[in-house]
């Protein structure tokens, strides 16, 4: 991990009595929050429309594929019936010429084999079409997952850029989850470090008593997120790690759907 040199140790703190909640009369912050929510709503609607378009295209293509396969299978089966009639007719003609019983039985056997072969071909066409339909649906679901995650990432990072106090909430939650630790190294993006110094007194209240807190800068940590190292281990609370968890969950759901399709 590449870290910038600056490190601050806080052994004794003084109370700034900072309030993380926006002031009631802070119209500019409220307006910014409203605009963010409006943008989030627009992004969500766009994602929903794109999701429906992807699934609709996949369903339409799958339906056309199945319809074509059914038509082809019907043609194959009809051809088999016609050939079967011809073979029966030939069997009768051959039967009279070669000895009716022997010739007829042989011709009948050939007819059954040919009919079975053609029917097998028809069923194969249908099965291949059904398999392709499942592949299309699964592929579309994968595209939807990628699309939703891309939009979620864009919205989350834009919100973190606009609302810089996001990192304060992330650090506070991380400290509460590691409340029994004694030494904390809070690793954040350099752009967030200055803000954390302003809130360090308030944040220290969420750590254990007499805890040692260091703030470290790391450009690889995205804005709005943090990592907290303690003697107990590392807590990754970056926005990227949370999006990765969502991606992992959705990918597992797609795999489950794929397995269900394969069992059908």
Image (spheres, rainbow, N blue to C red):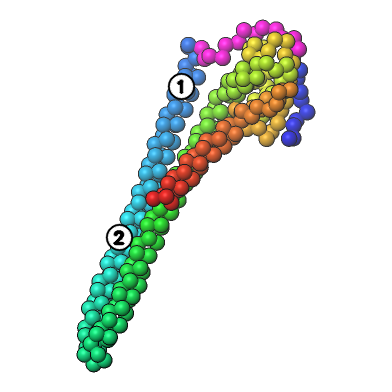
- Residue 262 visible in the displayed image: yes
Residue reaching furthest to the right: 5
**View extreme (bottom): residue:** 97
Q: Residue 176, located in which quarter of the rendered image?
A: top right
Can you say whether 16 is above or below 42 in the image? Answer: above
Residue 45: image location, x then y, percent: 39, 36
Determine if the magenta segment contains residue 19: yes
**112 w.r.t. 176: above or below:** below
Q: What element carries label 1?
A: helix
- Is the residue 80 above or below the residue 20 in the image? below
On the image, the x and y values in percent for residue 34 come to 44, 24
The residue depicted at 67 percent of the width and 22 percent of the height is 194
Q: In which quarter of the image is the N terminus?
A: top right
- Neighbor class of circle 1 (other Cα within 10 Å; few <14, some 14-19, many 20+) is few
State the extent of the magenta-drawn residues as a range. Answer: 11-23
Q: Tag on residue 67?
A: 2
| Badge 1 or badge 2: first in the primary sequence | 1
Q: Where is residue 225 in the image (x, y as percent from the top left)?
A: 61, 28
Q: Is mark 2 on a helix, strand or loop?
A: helix
Task: Tell me what residue is drawn at x 70 percent, y 26 percent.
Answer: 233
Picture disc at residue 31: 1
In magenta stretch: residue 36: no
- 195 vs 239, nearest the viewer: 239
In this view of the protein, which residue sits in the foreground, 182 or 33? 182
Q: Distance between the residues labelled 1 and 2?
A: 54 Å
Which residue: 60% across, 34% down? 241
Callout 2 crowding tier (Cα within 10 Å): few <14, some 14–19, many ≥20? some
């Amino acid at each position: 991990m590449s870290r910038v040199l600056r490190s601050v140790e806080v052994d004794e703190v003084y109370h700034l009595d900072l309030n993380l909640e926006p002031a009631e009369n802070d119209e500019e912050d409220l307006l910014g929050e409203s605009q963010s929510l409006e943008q989030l709503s627009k992004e969500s609607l766009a994602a929903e429309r794109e999701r429906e378009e992807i699934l609709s295209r996949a369903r339409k293509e799958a339906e056309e594929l199945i319809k074509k396969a059914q038509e082809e299978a019907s043609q194959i089966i009809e051809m088999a019936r016609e050939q079967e009639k011809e073979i029966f007719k030939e069997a009768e003609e051959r039967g009279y010429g070669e000895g009716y019983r022997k010739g007829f039985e042989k011709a009948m056997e050939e007819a059954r084999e040919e009919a079975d072969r053609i029917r097998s071909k028809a069923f194969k066409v249908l099965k291949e079409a059904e398999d392709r339909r499942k592949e299309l649906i699964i592929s579309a679901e994968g595209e939807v997952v990628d699309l939703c995650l891309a939009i979620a990432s864009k919205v989350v990072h834009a919100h973190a850029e606009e609302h810089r106090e996001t990192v304060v909430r992330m650090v506070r939650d991380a400290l509460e989850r590691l409340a029994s630790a004694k030494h904390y190294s809070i690793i954040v993006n350099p752009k967030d470090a200055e803000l954390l110094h302003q809130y360090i007194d308030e944040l220290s209240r969420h750590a254990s008593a007499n805890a040692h807190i260091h703030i470290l800068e790391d450009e690889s940590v995205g804005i709005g997120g943090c990592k907290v190292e303690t003697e107990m281990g590392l807590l990754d609370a970056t926005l990227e790690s949370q999006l990765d968890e969502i991606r992992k969950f959705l990918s597992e759901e797609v795999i489950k759907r794929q397995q269900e399709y394969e069992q059908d």
